Image: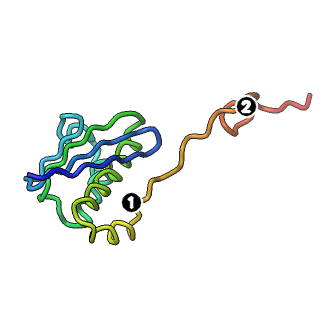
Amino acid sequence: MKTFAATGRRKCAVAQVRLISPGTGNITVNKRTIDDYFPVEVWRVNAMRPLELVEMQGNFDVAVKVTGGGVSGQTGAVSLGISRALCEYDETLREKLRTEKLLTRDPRMVERKKYGRKKARKRFQFSKR
């Protein structure tokens, strides 16, 4: 039994991913099933996209520990973590994952709120009189 570990990040979410080979296709996120943790289908599809792309859904048991951020950030973090762990497992998969932009860390973060403004860019209503 071999384990391949990697970390994925997106926004404020951090996912620690372990691929256990050989496996039966069990996927656990924070000790819960993926269907339980990500109840919406789109979230599950986004998180598991790297495994589907390289057609290895049933080859590994995936254990994920994810913290921080919201659900969207967590799915992105899980996806990046799985992609990196797959590259650790087999370096030839790197090119396929790279072309689908699954190995690129998304650098976009929430812009901070500025003083004298309602939000980061939104202003208070201007009154001439």
Position of residue 80 in the picture relative to residue 116 (left or right):
left
Q: Position of residue 26 (x, y in %)?
A: 12, 47
Q: Position of residue 121 (x, y in %)?
A: 69, 39
Q: Which mark is residue 57?
A: none
Tell me if label 1 and label 2 are in contact, CB under 8 Å: no
Task: Report the number of numbered marks.
Answer: 2
Q: Examine the rendered structure and indicate whether residue 91 appears above or below residue 36.
A: below
Q: Quadrant of the C terminus?
A: top right
Q: Secondary structure at mark 2?
A: loop
At a point 40% along the width and 45% down the height, the residue shown is 9
User: Residue 57 occupies which quadrant of the picture?
Assistant: bottom left
Q: Position of residue 58 (x, y in %)?
A: 12, 58
At a point 28% along the width and 53% down the height, the residue shown is 82
Q: Which residue lies under the disc numbered 2?
A: 117
At a point 29% along the width and 58% down the height, the residue shown is 49
Say which of marks 1 and 2 sits in front: 1
Q: Which residue lies under the disc numbered 1?
A: 103
Q: Examine the rendered structure and indicate whether residue 66 appears above or below residue 5.
A: above
Position of residue 27 in the picture relative to residue 23 (left or right):
right
Q: Secondary structure at mark 1?
A: loop
Q: Amino acid at mark 2?
A: Arg
Distance between mark 1 and mark 2 Cα atoms = 36 Å
User: Residue 60 occupies which quadrant of the picture?
Assistant: bottom left
Q: Amino acid at mark 1?
A: Leu
Mark 1: few, some, or many residues within 10 Å (few <14, many ≥20)? many
At a point 12% along the width and 55% down the height, the residue shown is 21
Mark 2: few, some, or many residues within 10 Å (few <14, many ≥20)? few
